[in-house]
Image: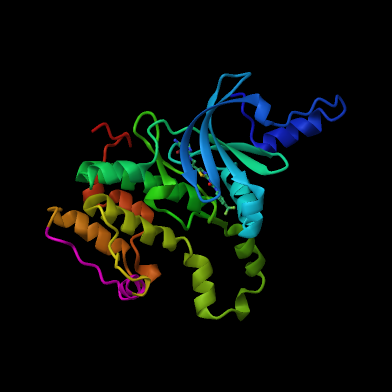
Amino acid sequence: MAIATETQQQEKKASEASADVQKRWTLSDFDIGKPLGRGKFGHVYLAREKRSNHIVALKVLFKSQLQQSQVEHQLRREVEIQSHLRHPNILRLYGYFYDQKRVYLILEYAARGELYKELQRCKHFSERRAATYVASLARALIYCHGKHVIHRDIKPENLLIGAEGELKIADFGWSVHTFNRRRTMCGTLDYLPPEMVESVEHDASVDIWSLGVLCYEFLYGIPPFEAREHSDTYRRIVQVDLKFPPKPVISQTAKDLISQMLVRDYSQRLPLHKVLQHPWIVQNAEPSGIYRG
Ligand code: AK7
């Protein structure tokens, strides 16, 4: 692989400092192709690294907009976190570079594009397809949580589909690394109230809730607490006002799994390893994690 992560680049830089041949990416290293998507902070393009012919996705972010929204620290955190993650269901972030006006993220290219578009097109997924995606997500999140990373922003817009149909989690812009906080707290834990001790210990369960919401949305085509007014959605979430419409017809085991993830008391949500063992997943998910239709 010719594309090096920032860390690898820095290692290279250090080892080659005396020779003064350090490699930094610039826009001229890439041929730019068609636009793949557009977001609030900039567009994503198909691109090819000229030397290796490696195909990537290049996300272009405008510094002025990042500064205006005061999210530079979030972007730095995303790059730092995501360049250390290696999992088949997590979109790779190979590195970044910048010029006067823009920041560029060098990303793994997901050939079948954005999942939310596929969901819009299909209205809702079959139980086989939904279960395959939920299992892939659970495995990716178990991996993240094992590295003390919480994504916190799992939604269809942040999910991509690879060339083989495999699901890829993207955009760790809202993720956090809990390791430092937890470590710093070790010494002072004695003085903390239960809710703070608990929130440190159980933070990762926010991703279980999101997975429950996604599972529902995959099957019904709409998120469970949707309402016209923001305040109504808020009320429905805090009351866990969970209803299963009669159509489309969904199996009782699927509803059972969703109900076990969408639990208000976060300590009572079904742990991710148990999600993988749930009968609905075992009976419906493709063992390969690849949905072929
Ligand atoms: N077919 C953005 C704004 C502000 C961010 O956008 C952080 C991302 C992966 C992304 C997916 C890009 C590969 C595609 C495709 C597509 Br379509 N990629 N194949 N799209 N990672 S977008 N990250 N981060 C971001 C911030 C922050 F500053 F707030 F953190």
In the rendered structure, the answer to whether residue 194 lies left or right of residue 244 reads: right
Q: Is residue 214 visible?
A: yes
Image quarter where the N terminus lies is: top right
Q: Is residue 284 visible?
A: no
Task: Please give the name of the residue rendered at 62% of the width and 80% of the height, measured from the top-left corner.
Answer: 191
Residue 74's image quarter?
A: bottom right
Q: Nearer the viewer, residue 119 or 290?
A: 119
Q: Nearer the viewer, residue 190 or 261?
A: 261
Residue 265's image quarter?
A: bottom left
The magenta span reads 232-246
Q: Nearer the viewer, residue 33 or 166?
A: 33
Q: Where residue 171 sits: x, y (%)?
A: 50, 47
Residue 110's image quarter?
A: top left
User: Looking at this rendering, what residue extends furthest in the right direction?
Assistant: 18
Image quarter where the C terminus lies is: top left
The reply to whether the magenta stretch includes residue 244 is yes
260 lies above or below 159: below
Q: Where residue 179 sits: x, y (%)?
A: 60, 58
The reply to whether the magenta stretch includes residue 37 is no
Task: Please give the name of the residue rendered at 61% of the width and 20% of the height, measured from the top-left corner.
Answer: 50
In the rendered structure, the answer to whether residue 234 lies left or right of residue 177 reads: left
In the rendered structure, the answer to whether residue 62 lies left or right of residue 217 reads: right
Q: Where residue 57 sits: x, y (%)?
A: 52, 33
283 lies above or below 262: above
Task: Please give the name of the residue rendered at 39% of the width and 53% of the height, measured from the top-left corner.
Answer: 155
Task: Please give the name of the residue rendered at 41% of the width and 30% of the height, measured from the top-left corner.
Answer: 111
Q: Nearer the viewer, residue 75 or 268?
A: 75
Q: Where residue 36 sits: x, y (%)?
A: 46, 35
In the rendered structure, the answer to whether residue 82 lies left or right of residue 37 reads: right
